Each structure stands twice: as structure tokens, then as C-alpha cells.
Amino acid sequence: MTPRVRVATCAKLPEPDQDAAPLAEAFARAGVDAQLVAWDDPTVDWDAPIATVLRSTWNYAQNLDAFTAWLGRVAAAAPLWNPIEVVRGNLRKRYLLSLASHGVPVVPTTLVEPGGELPFLATRAVVKPEVGAGSWMTKVFEPDQSDAAAAHLAEVLRFGSALVQPYVASVDVYGERSLVWIDGELSHAIRKSPRFSGDRETTTGPFDIAADERVVAEAALAPVASQILYGRVDLARDASGQPMVMELELVEPSLFFARGAGAADRFVAGLMSRLR
């Protein structure tokens, strides 16, 4: 019998999914019937016992309650990858505070809950939602733009909690490095340019994974490494050149399959080994 899986996307993608074609081709090579379906399509029988792998569900931040309910429904019917416990824990970026408390270097982060106020902006700063995908509602402000930053923060807080972080200058030159994890190991790395609300993603690479970046990425992944099929650690370098975590993506990250030789095939093989 031909194995079947569902690849979860959303009904209206906010931007093209560059991983879709390489992944579909890898599923075909493996002889897997992989159906691309939108998580927010009410006509899909999500109670059917068919495994689901999260991919481009990129509108979940604007529909968080519905998405979390859908996750529970899907995971109750058949295996979900990544596992629901990992996904739930990664939806809110306050995980950065937890990583920091365990000694993982992260970009300094202030969590602002609804009703809270903007912290003092001593330097250029980024204000963004705690729950978000892509660059949704992410903006950068100069220290003399505190009124505009406060207004944007108030808008973000209408949807939930917010993060305020210093702008990391190294992303303008060295770039933000995204280290991709597939089936138990770091696979490849790409460079991303700074991205804010309304911007398109710009990437280059692949690049060799620097030794110090590998150490930080593996430390960030350590608590969940045995549980996940895929993940991505986005890193930047601080003023002293040391790598720190910008984001740990375990829900629906782009994995840049086209930039990592054999990456899509390893993804499919890892998924199918978990479903046997």
C-alpha cells in the first residue's frame, strides 16, 4: 500500500513557499502519496487517520485559537510532526527567555504583556509580536522614535504579548544565519538579510556552519533534539562577535531544501521512519 501523508499549508499563502516543489519531488521519489492541504480548509476531514506534517501554515499567528484547536484535532487522529507538545511550546517566542535561563545566548529580549508599556529605547530597537510568522507586524525604531514605537507596540498588544529587542547591527553585514536541522543533525546554513513588516525574504547560501554557531544551535535544540523531525535556529552575532539565538523555529520554518544537497530526501526519509 502506498503510504499517505498530509502536508499542511494555509488557504492563502502570504508569500510563495520555496520548499514546496523540492519537498513534493522528494515525496514522489520515495513513493509517498503526499497531499498538500490547507489547515484552514473546513472541507478537509482532519479526523481521518492520516499523518500530518506542518509546513507553510504561515497565517496561524492571526488565527491562533483556531490553529491550536486544529493542532489538537489533527494530533488526536494521527501522528503530527513536529509533535504537538513541541509545537505548542514553540508558538510563543517567550521561549527565548527560557533558553536564556538555561544559559543559551539569545538576543536580549523584553517581554511586554497586554497593558504593558514600552521600555526605554537606549538604542535602535525591534518591536514585534510574541506570536508571529515571517515579518508580520515587525518594525524597527530609532531611539528618538519612542512615540511611534509606543504606538506600534499598542497595536501589537491588541493581538497578544510583544517582544522588544535591540537591533543587532551584524545582520546588516554578516547577516542572520539560519541553521537547518533535519532528522537528528544540522544539515545546512543560509544567510538571511534583515526583514521587517512588508519585506520579502532575501537569502543566500548555503554556507559552512561555523563551529561556534554549531555549538549555540545545538545547545538551543538540546531539550527537544530527540523529539523533533525538523527545526531551524536563526543566529546573529553580538557586538563582540559571539553568536546568539534570534529565533528557534520548530513549527513551520522554511528549511531551504533547494540550498541543501539531499535535504528534502533526508526530511522525507526521517518522516517515514517515524511513521513506520
Image: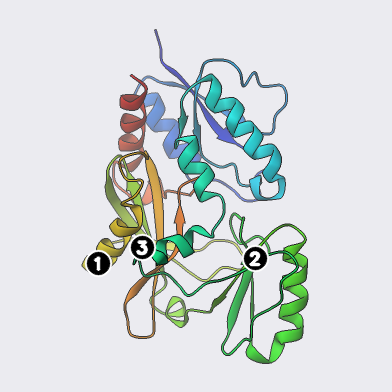
The tag on residue 102 is 3
Q: Which percent across, then down, holds residue 104?
A: 35, 65
The tag on residue 162 is 2
> What is the crowding at mark 3: few (fewer than 14 residues within 10 Å), some, or many (at least 20)?
few
Q: CA distance from mark 2 to mark 1?
A: 31 Å
| Residue at screen point 70% across, 38% down | 66
Determine whether 120 is above or below 137 in the image. below
Determine whether 73 is above or below 141 in the image. above
Residue 107 in which image quadrant: bottom left
Give SS at disc 1: loop
Q: CA distance from mark 3 to mark 2?
A: 22 Å
Q: Is residue 139 left or right of residue 102?
A: right
Residue 138 in which image quadrant: bottom right
For label 1, the residue is 210
Give SS at disc 2: strand
Determine whether 173 is above or below 122 in the image. above
Does label 2 or label 1 sit earlier along the sequence? 2
Amino acid under label 3?
His
120 or 273, nearer to the observer:
120
Amino acid under label 2?
Ala
Q: Is residue 12 visible?
A: no
Q: CA distance from mark 3 to mark 1?
A: 22 Å
The tag on residue 197 is none
Does label 3 or label 2 sit earlier along the sequence? 3
